[in-house]
Amino acid sequence: MRGTLFPIRAVALIALVALAATAFFYLGQGSPWSAEERQRIASLSLGALPPLPPDPSNAVGDMPAAAALGKALFFDTRLSANGQVACATCHLPDKQFQDSKPLAQGIGTTTRRAMPIAGTAYSPWLFWDGRTDSQWAQALGPLESPVEHGSNRADIVATVAKHYAEAYADVFGVAPGDTSVDRAFSNVGKAIAAFERTIMPAASGFDRYADALAAGKPSNALSPAQIEGLRLFIGKASCINCHNGPLFTDNDFHNTGVASVPALPEDIGRMDGASKVRQDPFNCLGEFSDAAPAECAELAFMKTEGEELVRAFKTPSLRDVAGRAPYMHAGQIASLAEAVAHYNAAPAAPAGHSELRQLDLTAEEQANLIAFLESLTPTE
């Protein structure tokens, strides 16, 4: 009898050990992540995000009074030609400060998708093509765009003088009418930027998992499929090459073979944006910047030519990406499944040279990668 029971007990023990090992794997403790993989995963956590550096071109960027004024301006429809469009019209707080439309809608229809704002204070370039080099310079463009706010700087300054004179003077030390229109207009952008600098992404299930893994603690924050998707993200699928750091973006520009939209004008992306940012009177080196020339290294040393800039668009953050369809600079891709399929297939670019290579992901691997991307949805 004793000889009969031993094999049964041994088999049961082996089964329990296997079950425990599987549980350990998916809880993150004892999982077969290499030291390099653990380092990569830790680098993606919001906990690894460094303190926000000051914007030397915006002297009021971290002033609470400027942020309060900027918030009021951000939601004020009076800063538009028809009194119906505010910054928040395309950048809705309950939609990650974007609008879920293929093309942004202001007074008219734009030619690109509205980008989310959270974390953009860390970026040296704004817009899909990087045609401005600060949040405050970016804020000024839509105000005078004929299809966005449809206004002009003189009317903007007059509106601010009428409704925000005291708050403006508290921040900038002068009344809106006591400087040139261009100076007052740039200050409007700086106040809006002070508010936008406070908009940061919230932690997700992935962050809980990454932090637990770094601390050597178990975590059930990710499902088995999401863990396998994470493995692909930092490995075989090479997503981390461009979507890296705590904000899941390298803040650079890439041609990824995204199709053009036949009804829209030709869009060459960064090639055009690099030229525009150099010519922008509100750039870091301009007279309305508060920065010293030595503090404008990004602008001074940026790449301005080369085939790689043709149809290269800014890498968007993947934070809360599952709630931000459609995707790409003109909403060409409707779903995460289609986006992953696009990168897996690596089609040729309509112009320039695509940086993609075929990934040969199986259907299961693509599903796991999507599951991981869904883990970047905030849980707070």
Image (cartoon, rainbow, N blue to C red):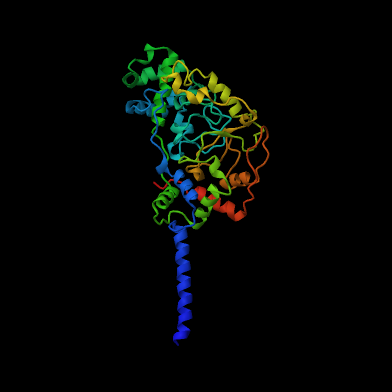
| Image-quadrant location for residue 302 | top right
Figure quadrant of the N terminus: bottom left
How far across and down, in percent of the image, does residue 364 sit? 59, 55
How far across and down, in percent of the image, does residue 272 sit? 60, 25
Horizontal arrangement in the rendering, residue 194 relative to residue 34 (left or right): left
Horizontal arrangement in the rendering, residue 335 relative to residue 96 (left or right): right
| Image-quadrant location for residue 191 | top left
How far across and down, in percent of the image, does residue 200 sit? 41, 37
Q: Residue drawn at (53%, 47%), measured in percent from left and top?
A: 234
Q: Most extreme residue toward the front, as rendered?
A: 35
Foreground pick, 352 / 143:
352
How far across and down, in percent of the image, does residue 73 sit? 40, 26
Q: Residue drawn at (43%, 26%), measured in percent from left and top?
A: 77
Any part of residue 373 in sight:
yes
In this view, 42 is above or below 293: below
Foreground pick, 369 / 7:
7
Horizontal arrangement in the rendering, residue 233 relative to residue 204 (left or right): right
In this view, 256 is above or below 361: above
Count of all numbered marks drawn on residues in the image: 0
Foreground pick, 115 / 105:
115
Any part of residue 376 in sight:
no
| Image-quadrant location for residue 304 | top right
